[in-house]
Image: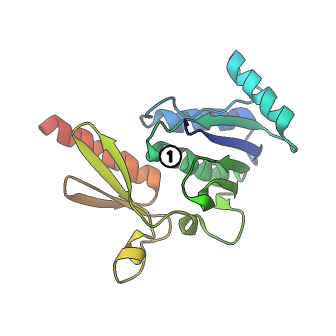
């Protein structure tokens, strides 16, 4: 079965729905996706598919939905994580509220999340909802391994990494960044540089 990750914007906060669509489009364009990039259908959508998708989501919803979209990770866990962290950043930036549904996620606590102003609803922080195991991105000629904030505390003596920080390793090189999206961007820059040398 093909895994599909669904997301909905429930409260746009300080931005209008079109602003959300533009912001998601800009962030999605900043990285490469295994399948189609992340997108958001709003009332301003011009494509027939986007308009019909939003109409059907609203027919099935029991609450107001400002915008909706989905991503097919295509076997790349980092695509699903990138989509999640884009939503986290935007709900924080716009002081909005969004819902994330990933029924195919093997981690039960990550299958359904409500993000309110950059934080998940409930008692657990986003770092606590993330697994402590590494996540791998397989690329031609190499693999990038990403380590979530809790990885160090779960596997080595000592504290976990700073809240929200992710580290990565590539060809024996390790580095850390303030967020998953920053770590992935830096890892891809290093991967392209190393590929150009070889």
Q: Which residue is pictured at 34% across the width and 49% down the height?
A: 186
Choose top left, top right, bottom left or bottom right for residue 18: top right
Q: Position of residue 131 (x, y in %)?
A: 49, 64
Horizontal side of 136 relative to 41 (left or right) equals left
Q: Residue at x 56, y 35 (%)?
A: 38
- Give how far across and how far down residue 6 sits, in percent: 65, 41
Circle 1 packing at 10 Å, graded few (<14), some (14-19), many (20+), is many
Residue 48 drawn at (x, y percent): 71, 16
Q: Secondary structure at mark 1?
A: helix
The quadrant in which residue 106 appears is bottom right
Residue under the point 74% across and 30% down: 42
Q: Which residue is mark 1?
A: 82
- Please, is residue 22 above or below residue 149 in the view? above
What is the x, y in percent for residue 27? 52, 39
Q: Is residue 46 visible?
A: no
Look at the image and tell me in which quarter the N terminus lies. Answer: top right
């Amino acid at each position: 079965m093909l895994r599909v990750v669904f997301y909905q914007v429930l409260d746009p906060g300080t931005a209008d729905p079109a602003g959300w669509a533009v912001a998601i489009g800009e962030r999605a364009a900043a990285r490469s996706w295994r399948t189609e990039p992340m997108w958001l259908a709003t009332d301003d959508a011009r494509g027939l598919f986007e308009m019909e998708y939003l109409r059907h989501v609203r027919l099935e919803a029991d609450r107001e939905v400002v915008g909706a979209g989905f991503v097919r990770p295509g076997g790349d866990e980092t695509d699903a994580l990138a989509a999640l962290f884009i939503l986290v950043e935007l709900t924080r930036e716009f002081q909005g509220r969004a819902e994330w549904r990933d029924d195919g996620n093997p981690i039960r606590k990550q299958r359904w999340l409500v993000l309110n102003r950059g934080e998940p609803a409930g008692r657990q922080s986003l770092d606590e909802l993330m697994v402590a195991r590494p996540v791998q991105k397989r690329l031609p000629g190499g693999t990038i391994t990403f380590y979530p904030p809790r990885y160090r505390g779960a596997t080595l003596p000592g504290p976990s990494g700073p809240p929200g920080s992710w580290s990565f390793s590539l060809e024996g090189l390790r580095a850390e960044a303030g967020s998953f999206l920053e770590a992935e961007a830096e890892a891809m820059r290093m991967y392209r540089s190393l590929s150009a040398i070889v």
